[in-house]
Amino acid sequence: MTHFKETFLYNDFDLVWKNLFDQKSSYLPVITNKMNYPVDIYTTDNGIQFEIAAVGKEKSDIEILTEGETLRIKYDKGTEEKRDFIHKGIAKRAFDFAWKISKELDLSKAEASMDKGLLSISIPYAKDRAPKQIVIK
């Protein structure tokens, strides 16, 4: 099967990033804002993969929501015990991410797993958007 990237010639970031300020714009090819939290986003043969550092967090503490074409991942750290730190190197901060997902992907079939402090979310390509061969009758 031909991969979407080869068929439609899109930039990898076209699947995730959209210029929200210009409703008529196409998907942006460049990320303009630097994220302050360790997140990896990459394409696979089956779709797109998100990996988010979640060290020290429980699965039940993280909320993953899909709203229309938006993927939202939230963690609220709550209140932390007051301590007198000699050194504080572990960032235990809350996060609330939201990405607008292209219709090339099927957000309703997204799956999440967590292993060794790494939250992984995979979103497959939409089957009805897959390239098809049309037979001439």
Image: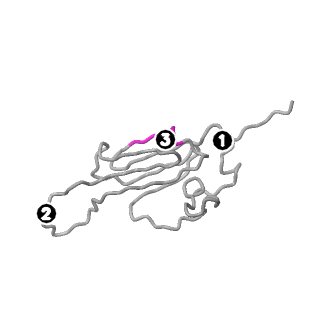
Residue 111 falls within the magenta-colored stretch:
yes
Locate residue 10, reporting x and y percent: 66, 55
Classify residue 86 by image quadrant: bottom left
Q: Residues within 10 Å of mark 2 (few under 14, many from 20)?
A: few
Q: Amino acid at mark 3?
A: Ala
Q: Residue at x 27, y 51 (%)?
A: 56
Q: Residue most toward the right?
A: 137
Where's residue 81, x and y in %? 15, 58
- Identify the disc placed on residue 62: none
Label 1: which secondary element? helix
Color theme of the render: one colour
Q: Give the residue drawn at x 76%, y 37%.
A: 133
Indicate which disc, 1 or 2, sits on the residue closer to the N terminus: 2
Q: Is residue 51 left or right of residue 90?
A: right
Of residues 114 and 101, the one nearer the viewer is 101
Q: Which sits earlier in the primary sequence, circle 1 or circle 3?
A: 3
Badge 2 marks a residue whose secondary structure is loop
Quarter of the N terminus within the rendering: top right
Rounded to the nearest angstrom, the CA distance separating label 2 from label 3 is 39 Å
Q: Is residue 70 left or right of residue 90?
A: right
Residue at image position (58%, 50%) is 102
Residue 44: x and y in percent read 56, 47
Q: Amino acid at mark 2?
A: Arg
- Compute the Cα span from label 1 to label 3: 16 Å
Identify the magenta region: 107-113
- Name the amino acid, label 1: Arg
Q: Which residue is mark 1?
A: 129
In this orientation, which residue lies closer to the viewer: 77 or 69?
Answer: 69
Q: Indicate yes or no whether the magenta region holds residue 87.
A: no
Residue labelled with disc 3: 110
Residue beneath disc 2 = 83
Mark 1 → mark 2, Cα distance in angstroms: 53 Å
